[in-house]
Amino acid sequence: MFILVNLKAYPCDPIEVATAARDVAESSGVRIAVAPQAADLSRVAETDVETWAQHVSSNGHGSYTGSTLAEAVADNGAAGTLINHSENRRKLADIDGSVTAAERAGLETIVCANNPTQTGAAAALGPDAVAVEPPELIGGDVSVSTADPGIVEDAVAAAAAVDPDVEVFCGAGVSTGEDVAAAADLGASGILLASGVAKADDPEAALVDLVSEI
Amino acid sequence: MFILVNLKAYPCDPIEVATAARDVAESSGVRIAVAPQAADLSRVAETDVETWAQHVSSNGHGSYTGSTLAEAVADNGAAGTLINHSENRRKLADIDGSVTAAERAGLETIVCANNPTQTGAAAALGPDAVAVEPPELIGGDVSVSTADPGIVEDAVAAAAAVDPDVEVFCGAGVSTGEDVAAAADLGASGILLASGVAKADDPEAALVDLVSEI
Amino acid sequence: MFILVNLKAYPCDPIEVATAARDVAESSGVRIAVAPQAADLSRVAETDVETWAQHVSSNGHGSYTGSTLAEAVADNGAAGTLINHSENRRKLADIDGSVTAAERAGLETIVCANNPTQTGAAAALGPDAVAVEPPELIGGDVSVSTADPGIVEDAVAAAAAVDPDVEVFCGAGVSTGEDVAAAADLGASGILLASGVAKADDPEAALVDLVSEI
Amino acid sequence: MFILVNLKAYPCDPIEVATAARDVAESSGVRIAVAPQAADLSRVAETDVETWAQHVSSNGHGSYTGSTLAEAVADNGAAGTLINHSENRRKLADIDGSVTAAERAGLETIVCANNPTQTGAAAALGPDAVAVEPPELIGGDVSVSTADPGIVEDAVAAAAAVDPDVEVFCGAGVSTGEDVAAAADLGASGILLASGVAKADDPEAALVDLVSEI
């Protein structure tokens, strides 16, 4: 299992969460990464935590102002990127372009999707993984792997039918080690989460709990 | 083969093109439809030509101002709708929603895509057809079925791999009966075209030529 | 006072509301218009009610699929158009373009804005009017003219400081004749409303009440 | 005069341009800043050049993935931000929100606009400056201050009519010290430029020329 902690625009200290993630990854052997604001990327990467971008644009080098260039996030230490998060929905053509741009820059890719149907569509674009996150569960206390396990199973099946090399992550409401174990049982290869760690009083303790059943 | 004439925002007389399309459909037995501006839909449908919308929104009834409600275009005579045309690119989640909304309103659906990869992704959303239109050929004089037949073949293969029930249309640069025949030979079930008819001095003659090899 | 009834994507019968609006306008002498779905425009205009579009695009004639061409809505009977409604927010450059496109097609224009600051900005683009609608009050039971009269007064002042020829409308929560009278007292030249009429059991009675204090 | 060098997504070395800008600012006494990719901000700021963001989102802290938080760019050394660049057009409501977000984070603001009309509208939102950049001149060899001096004068007048505290910058095609001097003569308080420095074989020499007539 791969645990990706999305820091969104939360008022947390990105270095504190990054340091905790690095330490728990080292002590547990579980792969854990942190996705900070683009402006915080280089400082987060300096902690030696695995660092991801929250988004990259579909454009390459050129006249694009205010875009997030895949090469720029890679140069500043990112190993991968989210694409099409539910808080940053993109056009189909741009998701295709962002996956291509990210691969060109050497970044791993996770494309987000609302439901099993969109998971199949996203898998057809050839990312490394698709994360299924029902919008109504994002930010809540109920894990998709508990509340609606059928969605995770259906997403795993939808991706496999299109491209068996594409992994499926699940997100939305995951906050405990049991949720993570349930997701793994349903066929998920990883977990996207955010507030459960980023807003925790003790991010390191939250991460220790999350990896406890892996 | 199904010929769909997209009137875009061209300064043509929609009733003149609709009447020509109706007459050529009747005389040739080929299925031909016209997609006018939403505001022209009811008047075009009154000519008894098969009428399509250029776009429908993903929303249903409710507080959505300036959207194009699937039910409203159906009530005014539309039989189907384009979705995600290259001049009206949409978010993946909204394409999914528009296909669902169109089906709920009883409309056929053609989702547009730039390339074979996106054709596979669009097919996963379950429309009736996907139209592959390389953006660089749209509005030009070179037909995709002539200039780059591999794109049409690859799109047909990509759609079939995801869902064999989804047909593939091709567009971009089609202007003659030979182009239509070439597209059919490559596996396309229909043709999207626009300026070749809508900007023709004699739309009826242009349509007669287009269906001549079917 | 000018009363503009926005039918949004509501499941009402647009012809029933249009007929009621026409009748109340005639009997009361108050200017009342109805803004239906673009696809319903020509049928609504045939009732002889003053008909408005909910949106027009910034483009002119050309290769624009799924846009709402200002000329097309004018040709089908529209006398004016909303632009930048809070449910259809637009880029600054496109609002500028839509005002220009609407004027070229002979349409009156009302640009919507969230607050007095944006009202001043919208007024600088030269529309006929700006409608100030605090998003938090839209669709509710509390009228902006009652709940926060300072917003209407500030919007009137902001528009006047930029261009004294631009009128100010107010919207959001207006549902009674008293709300309309209060808006007029605050300097508003018109009212935007939607659910208060479109969702009323008796749209004609709702309109009769709305104009009762004018 | 203030010279702001927008590095866009150019394949230049941001540290090389930043160092050159810092050195020319120091030697000439002219205010010069550099706007790199968000991911490069902290490294660029470490050179001690004045550093700007290319864009900030309208949101504050919260659940916003892939946005560019004003506080995050400020924390990483940005002193100001562009908003609504022609390559990153924004909704009117979001420009208003981004100006507010930037001010809350202590950033200076320059809102971009296509023409004098939009300059007036942007000035009504209360930024520190508006930059007028006719899209057809961006990236070209012809300076707006030479090609169409009336646009700069009209923009200065439009901003002054709305808010005399808002300065006007000009951009698009500026590449020589003469262009800068011409802009100053027309009433501009600063210059936005990009390729003239970022793509120059010798960025420092390009900057020395640009400030030579100030």
Image (cartoon, coloured by chain):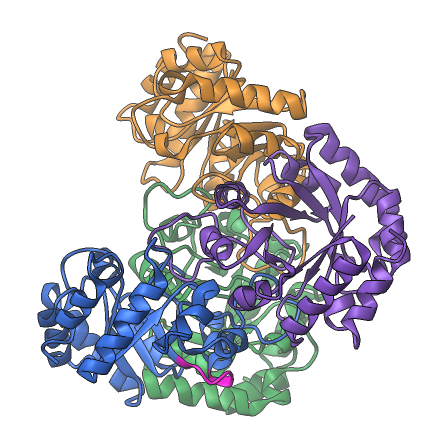
Chain colours: A blue, B green, C orange, D purple
The percent coordinates of residue B212 (x first, y second) are 60, 82
Is residue B1 something one can see in this rendering?
Answer: no
Q: Quadrant of residue D20?
A: bottom right
A133 vs B183, nearest the viewer:
A133
Q: Residue at x 62, y 70 (%)?
A: D9
Q: Quadrant of residue A170?
A: bottom left
Give the side of residue A2 with respect to residue D139, left or right.
left
Give the camera-side residue of D33 and B147. D33
Give the x, y percent position of residue D40. Answer: 55, 68
> In the rendered view, does C212 fall on the left or right side of D112?
left
| Rendered-image quadrant of the C terminus of chain A | bottom left
Residue reaching furthest top?
Answer: C213
Residue at left offset 78%, top offset 66%? D196
Q: Nearer the viewer, residue C87 or A193?
A: A193
Whether residue A106 is in magenta: the answer is yes
Numbered range of the magenta stretch: A103-108
Question: Residue at the spot x=36%, y=33% of the render?
Answer: C136
**B189 part of magenta stretch:** no
Closer to us: C33 or A27: A27
Indicate the position of residue A208 as horizontal and vertical percent values. Answer: 15, 72
